[in-house]
């Protein structure tokens, strides 16, 4: 479990040809524990550390990970957001993030307003259904607040988020450009609520009064 508060930016040092296999990352060693068996979020994707040395970790990447995330597009030297797993006594400065990427989205516009950086991101329908204004979303593992959500059925939605200077400086957001793909994780509480209530709401409108819409 993670909080979506990126600890540091690491860099890809080694890639097996084309992946899957082991992804080797360099990192500031004082910020990443790096014990074998630990979980590490890499651009929001929870991976297991299989080898570690000072300032370097190796993580196993499997085909399903590549199908769901942007990790397959990485190259040697590319920066990545890193966050170690939460301890039970840790504060949750963002929101609860599992590191299980739901889908990828595409940045379609970037703009500045005084000290904030605005991102507009296309998200697929599988993620858009959980997006609400003032709700939470993880972009490349970074917990952000949804400011606006513009539904564009049947393809999904365009969401807008605003980043403070600290977030831009401490994550890979400074490298974002229109067209870049990002890993998305929707609010897991919303997903659980939908799963639990789904059988009870089948055949009813989203706001149908009790006894109607059946």
Image (spheres, grey):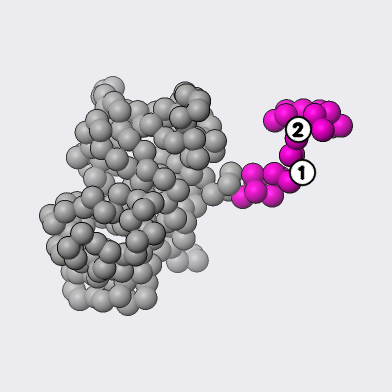
Q: Position of residue 116 (x, y in %)?
A: 30, 29
Q: Which residues are magenta?
A: 192-214
Residue at 25%, 37% in the rendered image: 180
Q: Which mark is residue 69?
A: none
The quarter holding residue 48 reads bottom left
The C terminus appears in which quarter of the rendering? Answer: top right
Position of 52 with respect to 185 (left or right) is left
What percent of the width, then of the height, locates residue 119? 32, 30
Q: Is residue 194 magenta?
A: yes
Q: Nearer the viewer, residue 159 or 10?
A: 159
Circle 2 residue:
204
Taking the spot 38% from the left edge, 51% from the top edge, the residue there is 68
Q: Is residue 136 above or below residue 46?
A: above
Mark 1 packing: few (<14 Cα in 10 Å), some, or many (20+)?
few
Against 79, is 121 above or below? above
Residue 75 image offset from top left, x and y in percent: 16, 54
- Where residue 21 sits, quadrant-wise, is bottom left
Q: Residue at x 49, y 52 (%)?
A: 96
Query: Is residue 56 depicted above or below 165 in this figure?
Result: below
Q: Is residue 114 above or below residue 60?
A: above
**6 lies left or right of 14:** right
Tag shown at residue 200: 1
Considering the numbered disc 1 on the image, is that residue within a helix, a strand or a loop? helix
Residue 67 seen in this snapshot: yes
In the rendered image, residue 146, in percent from the top left (x then y), is placed at 45, 33
């Amino acid at each position: 479990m993670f909080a979506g508060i990126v600890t540091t930016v690491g860099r890809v040092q080694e890639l097996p040809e084309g992946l899957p296999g082991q992804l080797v990352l360099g990192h500031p060693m004082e910020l990443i524990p790096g014990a074998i068996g630990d979980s590490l979020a890499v651009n929001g994707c929870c991976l297991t550390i299989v080898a570690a040395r000072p300032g370097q970790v190796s993580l196993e990447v499997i085909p399903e990970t590549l199908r769901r995330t942007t990790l397959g597009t990485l190259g040697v030297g590319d920066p990545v957001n890193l966050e170690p797993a939460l301890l039970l006594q840790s504060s949750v400065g963002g929101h609860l993030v599992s590191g299980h990427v739901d889908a990828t989205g595409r940045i379609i516009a970037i703009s500045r307003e005084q000290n904030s950086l605005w991102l507009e991101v296309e998200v697929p329908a599988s993620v858009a259904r959980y997006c609400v204004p003032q709700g939470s979303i993880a972009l490349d593992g970074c917990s952000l607040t949804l400011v606006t959500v513009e539904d564009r059925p049947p393809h999904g939605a365009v969401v807008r988020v605003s980043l403070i200077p600290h977030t831009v400086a401490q994550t890979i957001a400074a490298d974002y450009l229109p067209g870049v793909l990002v890993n998305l994780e929707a609010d897991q509480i919303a997903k659980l609520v939908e799963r639990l209530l789904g059988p009870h709401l089948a055949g009813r409108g989203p706001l149908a009064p009790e006894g109607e819409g059946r």
